Image (spheres, rainbow, N blue to C red):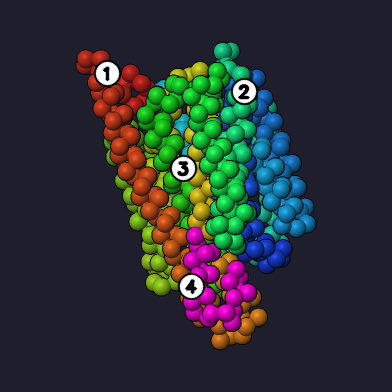
Amino acid sequence: MCMATFMTSLDLTIVNVALPSMQSELHMTAAELVWIISAYSLSLAALIPAAGALGDRYGRKRVFLGGMVVFLIGVLACALAWNAAALIAFRAVQGVGGAAMLALALSLITETYPPQQRAGAIGAWAAIGGTGFGAGPVGGGVLLTFFSWQSVFWINLPFAILGIVCTAVAVRESRNPRASRLDLPGLVSSGLALSCLTLGFVESSGHPWGSALVAVPLLAGAALMFGFFLWERRAPHAMLPPALLRARSFSAASGIYMLTYGGMTGALFWVTLYFQDVAGWSVLRTGLSWLFMNVPFLTMAQFGGRLDSRYRTSTVTVTGTLVAAVGVFLLSRSGTVPFAVSALGYALYGGGFGTFVPATTHVAMRDVPPGVSGAASSVLNASRQIGSSVCLAVLGAVGVNAAASSWHGRVGAAGAQQAQNVGAGKVHAVVAALGDGYRNAAVDSFLHGFQLAVAIAAACTALAAGLAYAGFRQSAARLAQVAPRGEPAGASAGDGER
């Protein structure tokens, strides 16, 4: 399970740091760059619930192993992609395999470990799997210094093969003999809704909000999402079992993940474009700078289980998300402050994330009945990917539109055709087309969009703190009320809040 999470974490950050290289070689627009990340996240979000249901019904190991094989195929196809459209399509294939891996990893841990050992196992899983998150930028920087962008996909090959072997040998099969049928109408409607919403927001970066390419997908996505929730209320085999909907802490955790991972994906997307395309950093220097974030993340993730056992989960999660929000806000000032301030932002962001992720995962799975652990793991992981795909599309559109608007205000009609290049951070292209006299205007306009988008990411992270305070504190109060006399609150639920 750690191997699978390592691969998916590595793939996310190592691809992120390679975006400017892909942009240059494949001549990609800002919208296509967003799709490189969103196609993967969207595929994960749409299929994770189905993978969890299939694992519960037909065998978690079997579905998990199949997902690793599909992920390997997607890695190979991405490395051989010949243009932007092919790369985006193959990223979606990668997401199909990753969906099975992410949907069932936490479920397999939950089914394997007894309650008294589960918090430590989840903490180790989060920490070891998170090393991929930390290794991605540095490894990508080293690879891209000597090789082309395809190397960030080839590096997954040995890990994927090792993961397949480890799964076949070490993982025992488990299933839910009372698993319900696959909720096909719910699966289709939710997947189409997320796809339409993401498409609409991505296209809004290059088209007016009232155009058919933007308005039609957004309206269709909203209608499909509304229909999905109506169907789930009466579906005989709902993707969202009633037991999950009644677990307030689980619902709160899903919302926290949606907001924080959406903010993280959007912030790192813009920060990477700024440091490489605008500030002119090398890919290696950019990757090494992420160590200011990754080291605190891995350090705090190691202590996640201990913090959760000593303090209330609400306290740990609220503190972690607030610290992370401050870190993102400091990153939003990059370009107008010394790098020392950005480095502090990285450190606070990483430390905050490493603090609240293990605690949030533990409390989310604590109250879930064992029979629906597969569905619970699926929904929890899907919430991360929904945030990553939809929020990235929103923040991408906000940043590009704000940069383009600022550019039009500075240069007028003279440089109108370069607005999209400004929004994408392609300052060199603007200078090549209009001359060096437009450089400062292009940089200032990009920074306007960049800072607005990353500031919104900080607001999303801060909003997650409020959700944690409301959802987890009420959960703790309920556990205190139901605990037997003389037994500490949370003891009846395993490693609950103390």
Which of the image's four quarters has the C terminus? top left
The residue tagged 1 is: 483
Q: What segment carries the magenta color?
A: 398-421
Query: Is disc 2 surrounded by few (<14), some (14 to 19) or many (20+) residues within 10 Å?
Result: some
Sequence order check: which comes first, mark 4 or mark 2? 2
Tell me: residue 340, above or below residue 103.
below
The residue tagged 3 is: 258
The residue tagged 2 is: 182
Q: In this orientation, does residue 60 appear?
A: no
Q: In this orientation, does residue 430 appear?
A: yes
**Mark carried by residue 406:** 4
Sequence order check: which comes first, mark 4 or mark 1? 4
Q: Secondary structure at mark 1?
A: loop
Task: Pinpoint residue 418: horizontal percent, then vertical percent.
Answer: 61, 74
Question: Which amino acid, by three-letter code, is at mark 1?
Answer: Ala
Question: Which amino acid, by three-letter code, is at mark 2?
Answer: Leu
Tell me: residue 60, above or below residue 276.
above
Residue drawn at (62%, 83%) of the image? 434
Task: Pinpoint residue 165: horizontal percent, then vertical percent.
Answer: 69, 32
